[in-house]
Amino acid sequence: MRDLKSEASAAGIRRCWILTDGKAGDELKCLGVANALGLEPEIRHVSPRAPWVWFMPWGPIDPKDKSDKRASPIGGKWPDLVIASGRRAVSYVRQIRRETNDDCFTLYLMDPRTGVNAAHMIWVPEHDWLRGPNVMVTLTSPHIMSPARLEEERRADRSLFGDHTPPYIGVLLGGDSQAFTFDEQSERELAFLLGEVSSKERDGPTLLITASRRTSPSMLSHIRDALRGHKYFFWDGRGENPYLSMLANSEQFIVTADSVNMIGEAVSTGRPVHYYRPTGGHHKIDHFLNSLEEKGAIRELEIPLEPFSYKPIDATPEIAGEVIKRFCEWRLQKGAGIDPS
């Protein structure tokens, strides 16, 4: 296994900014790459005012962030690496490149919508269409669920789940999205299937259930009704978030197909992932699901759950390794004399 932390330090990557508008999904992707590089990044949030925010990612940054460098999200000593994500961050990455005379390596996660010149390196998931010489493509997205963190959680106290005992099946719930709709029929069907899993699986598993902000109250109500009298743990958002412990300790997963990120995090464990498809769909998500099925990592939810195995799929260290390689090539081109090999 590569020592990415040592490689990053040897390459000269020591100071890092994470630049987003604070959305958790964007920030966690960036943190995943920074953590894989062994960095302790500075978290910086952009909050441009109207009307400048209306024209992002194509327009300029908010003038207040040019005039007051002490309060600016891009003020202060420049880092070696900026990892950015989110539409509003694109304009700020462009400004950083301009102010530093391109002397700060920039990585943008997801399609910036302004073309491949938005950053020195761009990462996109395979189901997006952006391609170019500086664009890296992987099937799954970067995240913070490293093998070391998962192993640490497996050894930790499971008191987060109260008196609920293993075996555990993790249930990761999404909700309505641009591609999928959880109508009444979908919600009732999913609730019924979870009830069947809980009552018919061997050894009487405990369902460990977590919901997203998109999960509707009606879906949760149907699931609670279907699981009445069964063994389950539901995180309601209060107290410590047990999500990482759920990923580490579940023997299998049930994940709704609307959430590419949760499916990607689940397959990084190497445990069987069964997905439930609600009403709707999209060709990009279909490509993602089909690709993971071809790799033997996921299956559509059927009763009874059949265990299966596959090699964990985790793009995060792969992306971090490519950052080091391209950073070295960039420094070499600038005359810093670092050998990218």
Image (cartoon, helix red, strand yellow):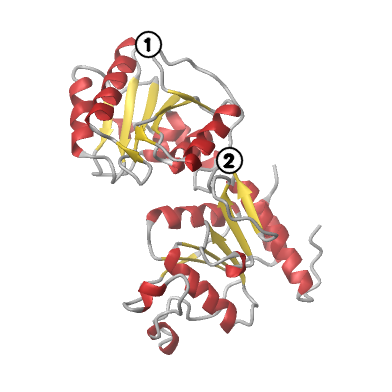
Q: Is residue 322 above or below residue 303?
A: below
Amino acid type at mark 2:
Asp
- Which quadrant of the figure contains the C terminus? bottom right
How many residues crowd around disc 1 within 10 Å: few (fewer than 14), some, or many (20 or more)?
A: few
Judged from the image, the secondary structure of the residue bearing numbered disc 1 is loop
Q: Nearer the viewer, residue 99 or 249?
A: 99
Question: Closer to us: mark 2 or mark 1?
Answer: 2
Pick the quarter of the image with the N terminus.
Answer: top right
In the image, residue 86 above or below residue 317: below
Residue bearing mark 2: 314
Q: Quadrant of residue 181?
A: top left
The answer to whether residue 168 is visible is yes
Q: Position of residue 98 (x, y in %)?
A: 58, 81
Residue appearing at x 31%, y 36% in the figure = 210
The part of the image, by quadrant, that contains residue 164 is: top left
Report whether 224 appears left or right of 18. left
Q: Which residue type does callout 1 highlight? A: Asp
Q: Is residue 163 visible?
A: no
Q: Residue at x 25, y 33 (%)?
A: 183
Per the rendering, the mark at residue 203 is: 1
Residue pictured at 47% horizontal, 15% vertical: 306
Q: Residue at x 38, y 58 (%)?
A: 23
Residue 195 locus on image (x, y percent): 27, 18
Count of residue discs: 2
Image location (x, y in percent) of residue 54? 36, 73
| Residue in front for this viewpoint, 259 or 250 | 259
Task: Tell me if mark 2 has few (under 14), some (14-19) or many (20+) residues whose alpha carbon lies within 10 angstroms of its own.
Answer: many
